Image: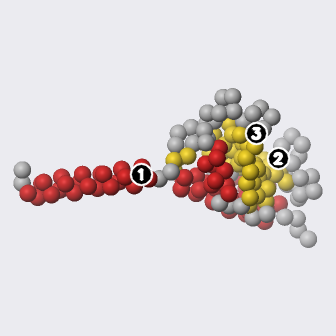
Amino acid sequence: MHKYALIALLCGLFILSATSIAFAQEKLVTADDPNSILEVAKGYGRASLSKDSQGDPWIEGKMDGLVYNIFFYGCKNGINCESIQLETGWGKDAKKLSLDEINEWNSKKLFVRSMINKNGLVRLHMEILLRFEVTEKNLDACFDVWRALMKEFHNTVMVKNP
């Protein structure tokens, strides 16, 4: 074997092993582990874990003064969940929005969607598929997007004009 080929082979093996070690050190998260999701949520403010009426995990949190919930979906007997939904809403005293205003917001944004529910209340939500593992950094990036867009929606759409 030529000495340069051997050097290239050894370099390639070193890079491959270094990449594998770096990837193995990153913490991976699934919806099966509500506590790992809770820890990411706590990085953005207050958050607590409990169970909903069906026994599925449920997290209530607060970011930048806005309360939100994390619902777990696709669970089997309160475990083995597949996805989460971050949701927040505004009460009856909030600014009334038309469907056109909701559609305008939705047409310009990725990742989150606003809606008016059957009771006329405005909701904002974001789904995150966690059936397979994602890195904690990836989930943290999703929470950062949620924080920014929830705050933007509140400040630009929901705040009543004086």
Q: Quadrant of residue 127?
A: top right
Q: Earlier in the sequence, mark 3 or mark 2?
A: 3
Identify the mark at residue 117; answer none if there is no mark: none
- Please state which amino acid type lies under the numbered disc 1: Phe
Disc 2, SS: strand
Residue 56, compared with residue 115, is above or below; it is above
Q: Earlier in the sequence, mark 1 or mark 2?
A: 1
Left or right: 41 in relation to 94: left
Spatial CA span between label 1 and label 2: 42 Å
- Please state which amino acid type lies under the numbered disc 3: Lys
Spatial CA span between label 1 and label 3: 32 Å
Identify the mark at residue 51; answer none if there is no mark: 3
Left or right: 66 in relation to 146: right
Residue 26, image x, y percentages: 47, 53
Q: Residue at image x 82%, y 46%?
A: 116
Residue 32, compared with residue 87, is above or below; it is above
Q: Which of marks 3 and 2 is in front?
A: 3
Residue 88, image x, y percentages: 78, 51
Q: Which of marks 1 and 2 is in front?
A: 1
Residue to which mark 2 is pinned = 116
Can residue 27 be seen here? The reply is yes
Disc 3, SS: strand
Identify the mark at residue 23; answer none if there is no mark: 1
- Please state which amino acid type lies under the numbered disc 2: Ile
